[in-house]
Image: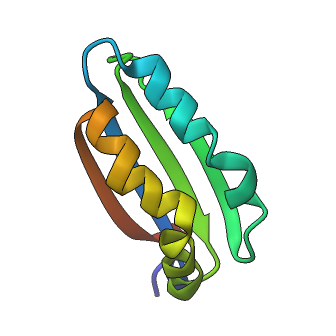
Amino acid sequence: MSDFSINSTQLVCVAQFVAKPGKRDALVAALAALIPDTRREHGCIRYELNVSLEDENKVAFVEKFVSKAAFDEHCSKAAIQDYFHNVMPELVASHHVEVFNEVIA
């Protein structure tokens, strides 16, 4: 018998972005602007923005939603689509987005 289970219902997303040179503050401002509306979305459990201790140009969202459907709905919002299609190309040198299921110990 294991001492853990995997929550396959909820979805955790880690979205990392590396700012282009001189664009870190603009990137953080653009991402921070997404926080209030996202936290009010039905299905959002956690939505926090973090700056790396090792590289000040690297920022990451840690997000948790009640389901994949709630996460997909979040991703389809106009503000998120605008960020990825219009804002990100100007501010971001590289990015990595990965989704997980939480391990409950």
* Image-based side of 11 in relation to 45, left or right: left
Whether residue 23 is situated above or below residue 78 in the rendered picture: above
Residue drawn at 32 percent across, 18 percent down: 55
Q: x%, y% of residue 28?
A: 51, 29
Toward which corner of the image does residue 57 lie, by quadrant?
A: top left
Give the side of residue 40 with respect to residue 32, left or right. right
Q: Nearer the viewer, residue 99 or 89?
A: 89
Name of the residue lying farthest toward the left: 94
- Report the number of numbered marks: 0
Q: How is the image coloured?
A: rainbow
Residue 41 location in percent, x, y?
Answer: 73, 69
Q: Position of residue 52 (x, y in %)?
A: 41, 25
In the picture as drawn, the residue positioned furthest to the top comes out as 22
Identify which residue is drawn at 44% across, 40% down: 60
Q: Nearer the viewer, residue 69 or 87?
A: 87
Where, quadrant-wise, is the C terminus in this rendering?
bottom right
Foreground: 21 or 48?
A: 21
Asked if residue 11 shows in the view, the reply is no
Whether residue 89 is visible here, answered yes or no, is: yes
- Residue positioned 49% across, 75% down in the render: 76
Q: Residue at x 42, y 32 (%)?
A: 59
Instruction: Tell me: residue 3, above or below residue 98.
Output: below
Q: Is residue 25 left or right of residue 96?
A: right
Q: Position of residue 46 (x, y in %)?
A: 66, 57
